[in-house]
Image (cartoon, grey):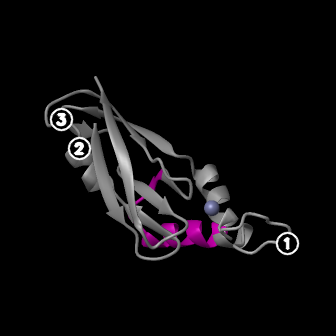
Amino acid sequence: MTTINIKSASREDLVDITREVADAIPPDGDGVAVLFTQHTTCGLTINENADPDVRHDILLFLKNTIPQFYDGFRHFEHNSDAHLKASLMGSSVIVPFENGKLLLGTWQGVYLCEFDGPRTRSVIVKILR
Ligand code: ZN
């Protein structure tokens, strides 16, 4: 098991961790990398890494759809929006690899989805072969 530590830069942020994931897999192996985060206000996803506007638009849509302050939210930390967004994105992704290379599509990257930063997050990488 490997742990990737990531520093997010703002309350909401999509941090590209593709390189860190690539570094966590065996250099010549075949298998599957299971990425899992133990946090409750961040998630993981795979999406486009070519046009940064895609990241912007994902965050904008989530922010507009799930506002931080919503009439009726009761959670005392006032970050229920972050918990909701984290559940929508999910706390794990699976990436297959072959000959030490991630089998991501040309335009795909792996992202940590920060919804209650900035702070340091960790992602567990478990290799199954
Ligand atoms: Zn909370």
List the residue tagged with mark 3: 26
Crowding at label 2, few (<14), some or many (≥20) Cα neighbours within 10 Å?
A: some
Inter-mark Cα distance, 1 to 3: 48 Å
Residue 120's image quarter? bottom left
Q: Is residue 107 visible?
A: no
Which residue is painted at 28% across and 22% down in the image?
Answer: 129
Asked if 108 appears above or below 120 in the picture, the reply is above
Residue 56 lies in the magenta stretch: yes
Quarter of the displayed picture in which ligand 1 can be seen: bottom right
Crowding at label 1, few (<14), some or many (≥20) Cα neighbours within 10 Å?
A: few
* Residue placed most toward the observer, 106 or 65: 65
Which residue is painted at 26% across and 53% down in the image?
Answer: 20
List the residue tagged with mark 1: 71
Asked if 121 appears above or below 44 in the picture, the reply is below
Which mark is on residue 24? 2
Query: Which three-letter amino acid code belongs to the residue tagged 3?
Result: Pro
Q: Which residues are magenta?
A: 45-62
Q: Residue extending furthest top?
A: 129
Percent position (x, y) of residue 114? Answer: 49, 64
